[in-house]
Image (tube, helix red, strand yellow):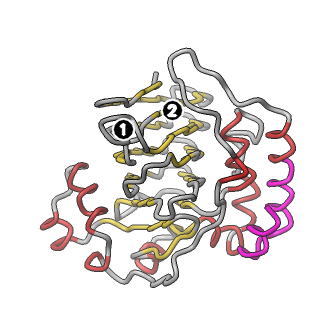
Amino acid sequence: MLLISQKKKETRFLLEFRLKAYKKWKQMNEPEWAYLKFPQIDYQNIIYYSAPKSQKKLKDLTEVDPELLKTFEKLGISLTEQKRLANVAIDVVFDSVSIGTTFKEELNKFGVIFCSISEAVNEYPELIEKYLGSVVPIGDNYFSALNSAVFTDGSFCYIPQNTICPLDLSTYFRINDQQSGQFERTLIVSEKNSQVNYLEGCTAPQYDTNQLHAAVVELITLENAVIKYSTVQNWYSGNEFGKGGVYNFVTKRGLCAGRNSKISWTQVETGSSITWKYPSCLLVGESSTGEFYSVALTNNFQSRLIP
């Protein structure tokens, strides 16, 4: 945690956030589920910080990994539409770091903030301190506590009042290193009378060993605000004999804090060897709405625990 904090040049607030989460995590036991069986994870054998040798900043969609474009096609965004309209702003996260975010300057003209969460920690500390951990507390569950202690990057989105985000926002996550875990954190805040569409895609290479993905997503909508959050999960699922694959243990939660606010979850689950995921909404605001649409496909030895 100290190494991650030093490499990211983080604020004192975030270091204390990590240390509190680690203390909570050490007091918890790894969950045992009735319908999901897996070998005990050796958390000392996971690489918690891994960065690509070349961190080239992306300038446009022509530089994006082809796997990302395939993921967008599954979401119904054709390659020709991307090239013609370029209507998707992308944050690309490889292993532990964001290597680039597109269309930041265009979004800034509308007051929209879209950047890596490590960048937001230093550039928008007041927003991070206000909202980080406000929907998923550090001690919420075993894997969210682990994420809170060791997360290295992810996406931060802030939509100001009376703004409809002019572009769809998207993040692509990829685990490249065989021994690395993926512990990204996503935080999206939609202020009064604002709206945003967010798309998330993920892939991983085929390895004979298992990898751990333990993410946390926090969404916050204020009065009359709308967030539509879509996921295509395509982590490696393991071979036909059940060897290898990603353990996908994710906490996703939205807070409809304002009157008439709305959060909509849409997800397609095709990858990972084991998935434990509970997208949910806290309907605090009067007449607020939460929606959840999910399609999960399994093959060979894949297992799913999704409500």
Q: Which residue is mark 1?
A: 267
Measuring from the top left, give residue 59's x and y in whole percent.
37, 83
Label 2 or label 1, whichever lies nearer to me, is 2
- Is tag 2's residue or tag 1's residue first in the polypeptide sequence? 1
Q: Dot 2 lies on which element?
A: strand
Residue sitting at x 40%, y 56%? 204
Measuring from the top left, give residue 219's x and y in whole percent.
56, 45
What segment is highlighted magenta in the picture?
A: 1-20
Which of the numbered marks, if any, corresponds to residue 290?
A: none
Measuring from the top left, give residue 146's x and y in whole percent.
71, 45
Which amino acid type is marked by label 1? Gln
Magenta region includes residue 15: yes
Q: Dot 1 lies on which element?
A: strand
Residue sitting at x 50%, y 46%? 210
Up/down of 178 relative to 272, above or below: below
Describe residue 226's horizontal placement relative to residue 2 as left or right. Answer: left
Describe residue 42's horizontal placement relative to residue 189 as left or right. Answer: right
Up/down of 125 relative to 256, above or below: below
User: What distance separates the C-alpha of mark 2 from that of mark 1?
Assistant: 11 Å
**Residue sitting nearer the eye, 27 or 211:** 211
Q: Residues within 10 Å of mark 1 (few under 14, many from 20)?
A: some
Extreme-left residue of the structure: 80
Residue sitting at x 64%, y 60%? 47
Q: How many marks?
A: 2
Image quarter of residue 65 = bottom left
Q: Main secondary structure of the magenta part?
A: helix
Which amino acid type is marked by label 2? Lys
Quadrant containing the N terminus is bottom right
**Residue sitting nearer the eye, 256 or 198:** 198
Which of the numbered marks, if any, corresponds to residue 277?
A: 2
Describe residue 147's horizontal placement relative to residue 106 as left or right. Answer: right
Contact, mark 2 vs mark 1 (Cβ under 8 Å): yes
